[in-house]
């Protein structure tokens, strides 16, 4: 089948990989190169934020963690870390599928994948091309006039616009890269009033972050950068002397829940909010089933 996948972020590329791997004739249509997408801003730790929890999110998370562990891809490491949560928060159900889970009120410790997203996405785009898929860099204005048997709408924020879905909104996220002093564990702290995270990738550490509903621009702010560095150094004192390498802002494609369904010859897969890296492979499996 001739399939156009609109979107070249983690969702579009994972779908394109599954579809081309199953023998379909795939073309990826994207405005941006992989390293310019929101996906390339993500800190890349694999578990969903609390707001995203549901049965299918659990299933997608488990499938994705399994896939990332088995890929042997550059930019992917599997390491232990700690997730601080409010003391009264229940243990999320996906956590029980994580190997070596330890939990006590206010704290979960487990092993999961961390993804250096620009490195991984470059590799994934190469794998997609190696499976025979083509990529065209252009803006798609409408889904119904593409020359294909079937279209996959995996365009993140743009996916909402293309589907006429006003429930998709941008939520800005600001991160800072520091040189990695050799950290061996990730930390996500959702227990403090402003959440923060420290995700080590070997050469650099992604520190964050912010949640800014309605943000439209992606220009880092020096004041926010300084505040993130201060908060993350407080959380991980080993970062005290780590040089600041740069800052990035991305716009998470938020929706009350991920849209993954088929409408005629269009399969929609967008609205992954703050969990697209985590959910990508599980969603790509479901997209393949719908095709
Ligand atoms: C600061 C930050 C930290 C994050 N941390 C994590 C994390 O640790 N773990 C996690 O799981 N997730 C994390 N996320 C969330 C994750 O980055 C997103 O959920 C994910 O990137 C969404 O992927 P996507 O492919 O749907 O969208 P995108 O990466 O935005 O890709 C959309 C693609 O569609 C293309 N496109 C859009 N409109 C059109 C059009 N009209 N025509 C052609 N092409 C179009 C774009 O060019 C792009 O290629 C984080 C996000 C941010 C901002």
Image (cartoon, rainbow, N blue to C red):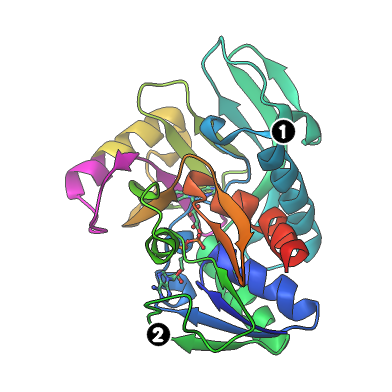
Quadrant occupied by the C terminus: bottom right
- Give the vertical position of 261 relative to 145 (above or below): above
Q: Residue 72 carries which label?
A: none
Tell me if I can see residue 59 in this picture: yes
The earlier-in-sequence mark between 2 and 1 is 1
Q: Residue 138 carries which label?
A: 2
Side of 163 where 211 appears, left or right: left
Extent of the magenta region = 201-226
Identity of the residue drawn at 35% across and 28% down: 194
Residue underneath mark 1: 94
Could you say whether the residue bearing mark 1 is in a helix, strand or loop? Answer: helix
Q: In this view, does 35 lie above or below 238?
A: below
210 is within the stretch colored magenta: yes
Q: Is mark 1 within 8 Å of ligand 1?
A: no
Give the left or right position of residue 91, taking residue 89 as reference.
right
Mark 2 Cβ and ligand 1 under 8 Å apart = yes
The label nearer to you, 2 versus 1, is: 2
Where is residue 106? Give x, y as percent: 58, 15
Is any atom of residue 79 visible in this view? Answer: no
Nearer to us in this view, 53 or 287: 287
């Amino acid at each position: 089948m001739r399939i156009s996948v609109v979107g070249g972020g983690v969702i579009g590329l994972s779908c394109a990989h599954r579809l081309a791997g199953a023998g379909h004739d795939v073309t990826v249509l994207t405005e941006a190169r992989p390293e310019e997408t929101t996906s390339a801003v993500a800190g890349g730790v694999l578990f969903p934020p609390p707001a995203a929890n549901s049965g299918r999110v659990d299933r997608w998370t488990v499938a994705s963690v399994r896939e990332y562990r088995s890929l042997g891809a550059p930019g992917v490491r599997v390491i232990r870390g700690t997730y601080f949560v409010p003391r009264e928060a229940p243990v999320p159900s996906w956590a029980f599928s994580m190997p070596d889970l330890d939990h006590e009120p206010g704290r979960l410790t487990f092993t999961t994948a961390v993804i250096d997203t620009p490195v991984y996405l470059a590799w994934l785009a190469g794998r997609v091309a190696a499976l025979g898929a083509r990529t065209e860099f252009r803006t798609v204005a409408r889904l119904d006039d593409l020359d294909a048997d079937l279209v996959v709408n995996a365009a993140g924020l743009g996916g909402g616009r293309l589907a006429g879905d006003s429930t998709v909104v941008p939520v800005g996220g600001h991160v800072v890269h520091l040189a990695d002093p050799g950290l061996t564990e990730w930390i996500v702290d959702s227990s403090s009033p402003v959440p923060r995270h420290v995700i080590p990738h070997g050469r650099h550490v992604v520190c964050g972050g912010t949640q800014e509903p309605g943000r439209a621009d992606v220009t880092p702010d020096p004041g926010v950068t300084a505040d993130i560095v201060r908060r993350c150094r407080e959380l991980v004192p080993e970062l005290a002397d780590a040089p600041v390498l740069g800052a990035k802002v991305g716009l998470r494609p938020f929706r009350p829940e991920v849209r993954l369904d088929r409408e005629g010859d269009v399969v929609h897969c967008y609205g992954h909010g703050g969990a697209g890296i985590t959910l990508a492979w599980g969603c790509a499996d479901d997209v393949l089933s719908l095709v």
